[in-house]
Amino acid sequence: MHRTIQRALVTGATALLIGAAALVVAPATAVAQTVTKQPPASTMQPYAQQDTSHKAKAIQHAQAALDAADAGHSDSMVKEAKQALSEAKQAEQTMPTADLSTAVKNLQLAVNEAQAGHTAEAKQAVQTALEHLRAG
């Protein structure tokens, strides 16, 4: 009978150890599952990077507007200037600076001038906007 009690105690102690180990492992597994449910780091962009991408797109469209003006394509110039204006406004909303504000004003002027058929004035306004986009 003494051995029976001893076996029961060993079995009980083993069960307690296994249970305790399960309690330690279970929270760690839950944490790992929670972490893996987050989106990959590559899809999460920091605040400043988002602003930079709008500014970069504004620069690309402003340059395309200049290229269109040089090629004599006024419709393309208007389209690209409008795109540049839209991107610059988005960048300014999230991270306002004096340079972005000046770029937005010049891009609006460029759109207005291009729509009125004043290509030279529109081109000058886009060039000024580009200088401010690149500076700020």
Image (cartoon, helix red, strand yellow):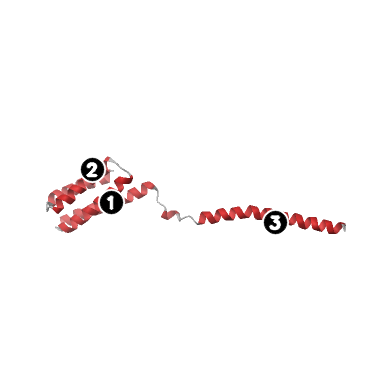
Task: Using the image, tell me which numbered label, if any, was put on residue 102.
Answer: 2
Q: Tag 2's secondary structure?
A: helix
- The kind of residue on which mark 2 rests is Thr
Residue 117 in the image: x percent, y percent? Answer: 12, 53
Residue 3 location in percent, x, y?
85, 58
First reached walking from the N terminus: tag 2 or tag 1: 1
Badge 1 or badge 3: first in the primary sequence: 3
Res 70 quadrant in image: bottom left
Viewed as shown, does residue 81 lie left or right of 53?
left
Asked if residue 93 can be seen in this view, the reply is yes
Who's the residue at 18% across and 55% down the image? 78
Q: Around disc 3, counting alpha carbons within 10 Å, would you say few (fewer than 14), some (14 to 19), or many (20 or more)? A: few
Residue placed under numbered mark 1 in the picture: 87
Which kind of residue does numbered mark 1 sit on? Glu
Q: Residue at x 41, y 55 (%)?
A: 43
Disc 1: CA contacts within 10 A as few (<14), some (14-19) or many (>=20): many
Separation of residues labelled 1 and 3 (CA atoms) = 60 Å
Give residue 90's position: percent from left, percent from top: 30, 49
Mark toward the start of the polypeptide (3 vs 2)? 3
Q: Which mark is residue 32?
A: none
